[in-house]
Each structure stands twice: as structure tokens, then as C-alpha cells.
Image (spheres, coloured by chain):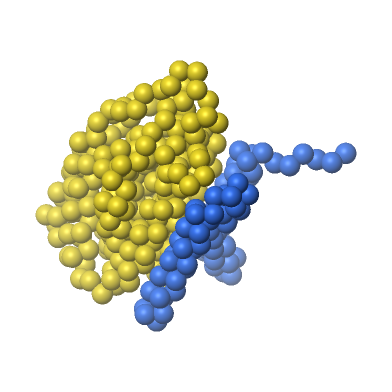
Amino acid sequence: MKRPPLSPSRASDVLLILLLLVAFVATLPIDPIGTIALAVLTTALVVWPFGVLVWLARRWARIGDLRFVGLVGVLLIVAVGSAGLAIALAG
Amino acid sequence: MESELLAAVLVGGLALVTATLGAIGGLGGAVLLVPMLVLLGWSPLEAAPIGIAMSAAGALAAVPRQTLTGLTNYRLGVSLEIAASFAAAAGALLSILLPVAAVQYALGGSAVIASMAGGLRRGQRNQPVEGARMEDLGDRPGRLASAYPDQSGRVIPYEIARFRTGMGLIGGAGLLAGLTGVSGGFIKTPVMSEVMRVPVKVAAATTMFMIAITAAVTIAVYTSQGRITAAIAPAVIGGLLGGRIGAAVQPRLPATLVRRLLSVSLLVIGIVLVVRA
């Protein structure tokens, strides 16, 4: 029998618990595990909002709301571009 | 070793409390956490990444819950965040060039502004439409106006006013976010609520979504500057737990009481920081 997919509420709970575990490991002074956990944690904090934006763009594209799909594209370019510019200038 | 453990527990505990308050009021929480850490001896440059990591974690925990309640206006959030993201990256870049006292002044000023804005906020403007459903009055393609359900499930429609002014002010909030390590939510929520006339609960939930993006951009810049260390991990733990608790209790608490408490604490923190600077 096929298992039903996780509900959004359940999926967010699972993600929360996983991140709590990773954050706990990142507090431990054990290299390289602590360093790897910190890298995973930082990546998760940076990447997930962009995942939400992609989800929104797909949802709005399905209902033909192209104006806001375009705005998501602008936001992605501005956010990634301005961060990239700041990193390049700081470097 | 013992002092490191104590510091981690302290940061985690403070992050838990501030993220809970932040999620309830749509303020992010870093505006409370960063000044506290500075008062406890952290330098503003050390405290800023801890604050922004806590905000990102709090938003990550709160946003899914607030999305399920139908409070988040994603179209408004995406539109306003274009200005905030650009300004946040500029602020993060400037923060490394500015003297410590200037960052402390900016932080103290931010806290006082947040206190005044929170204290001036008013009660409910929009009224529920009896018998209406979210499908009838909620999100529409191409429109920023929407609707949200109140505690008893009645649908309350709302419009957006003074969009351009709000966008400019939220750009300023993004600059402060990058500059001081606070998430800027303490400006975004009052701007949406008071300038753009968005209902307070919707403004708070939408702000949490925007904070996540602003924080992600700022964390990326801080990482490139080598300022993201293991010190953020306890703040992330506190932020994740606090964000989830705040999003769960938000609908049950009187917003006026929360706003007044936050207002008073922000005023005290702001004055102390400006005097120290």
C-alpha cells in the first residue's frame, strides 16, 4: 500500500526537528562534525526562503498570475545579486 | 570550557525568549536579542550574526504555521522585499566599515523607533463579513488586497494603502537590518500596519516571511566575511523553538498587551544603548 504524503504541517515539524538536531551538533566542539553541522545549518537558513519563493512562483504560474511570478523573479535576482555584489566587494 | 557552555546556554535562552516575542508581534526578535548581548559584553560585530541567525531560525519555524492559518500575504511580502533585500545587503557591507559606536547609535535609535511605533499602533480597523468564505474574498491573481480569518473563523477583507511610501520605508528597514544585525521586522510590521493599513496580524505574519529572506541575504554576506561561527548554533536552537511557540500562541494572546510590553522593553534597551555609545 502506498504511504500518503506528509501534510504541510507534519513536514514542517519534521524539518524543525532535523534542524534542531543539526544545530545541537553544531554546538559541540568536535571537529569536523561540528564544522560540517554548522555549514549545513547555515546553508539551510540561507536556502529555505528561496525554496519558498520557487514554490510561490510555481503556484502563481499555475493560476496564471504572471505579474507576481515576474516579481518573484525580480526578487530572486535582487536578493542573490545584491548578496553576490556585497560578497565580491567585501572580498 | 565552562564559561563557553554558560555563554551558549545564555544565548540559547535569550534567543528562545526573544524569538517567541518576535513571532508573536511580528518583530523578528533580533532587535531585543542583539542589544541584550551587547549589554552582556558581546561586541556589536559579534552580536549581529547571532541576532540575524536567531531571526532566520525563528522565521523558519513560524512561517509554515502562519501560512496554514491564512495570515501571510505573500504577494505583498514579495513586492516589499525587493526593496528590503537590496538595502539589507548594502547595510551588511557598510557594517564592517563603520565604527562600533556608530553601530550602537543605530541600534539604540532603532529600538527607540520600534518602541514608539509599537506604542502608537491602534486596534482593529477592518470588520468581518458575515457568511463570507476565504475563497470569495481572499487572494486574487494580480491583487495585493486579500482577506484573513479571525479567531472565530469569520473572514475579514482588507485593502492596501500608500504602497510606494511603505516600500520606501521598508527599504530603510532593510538597510538597518544589514547594518545592525537586527531583522528589521520591528519597522516592517508597524509600517505595514500603520502606513499601509494592513491588519496587524497579517502584517506580523507577512513580516516573518520577509524577515526570512532579508536574514538569508545577510547571513550569506556575513558568511563571506567569516563572521558565522559556532556561536550562532545556540541562538538557532532558541530561535527555532521560540518561533514555533510564538506562532502557536500568537492567536490566543491580546495583541495590545504584547505590543505594550515590547514597547517598554525596547525603549529601555534603546536608551541604555545610546547612553553607552
In the image shown, does B276 or B116 lie closer to the viewer?
B116
| B24 left or right, relative to B196 | right
Q: Colour of chain A?
A: blue
- Residue B71, horizontal then vertical, whole percent: 46, 36
- Residue B246, horizontal then vertical, whole percent: 43, 37
Tell me where residue A33 sits by quadrant: bottom right
In the image shown, does A81 or B33 lie closer to the viewer?
A81
Q: Residue at x 45, y 44 (%)?
A: B143
Look at the image and tell me in which quarter the C terminus of chain B lies.
bottom left
User: Which chain, by letter, is yellow?
Assistant: B
Look at the image and tell me in which quarter the N terminus of chain B lies.
bottom left
Q: Residue at x 16, y 50 (%)?
A: B272
Q: Residue furthest top?
A: B130
| A74 left or right, relative to A1 | left
Whether residue B267 is visible to the viewer of this picture, yes or no, is: yes
- Residue A83, horizontal then vertical, whole percent: 42, 70
In the image shown, does A82 or A58 lie closer to the viewer?
A58
Whether residue B247 is visible to the viewer of this picture, yes or no, is: no
Q: Residue furthest left?
A: B275
Number of numbered labels in the structure image: 0
| B211 left or right, relative to A38 | left
Q: Residue at x 31, y 32 (%)?
A: B258
Q: Residue at x 29, y 61 (%)?
A: B175
Above or below, A67 against A4 in this view is below
| A8 left or right, relative to B19 | right
- Residue B205, horizontal then vertical, whole percent: 42, 41
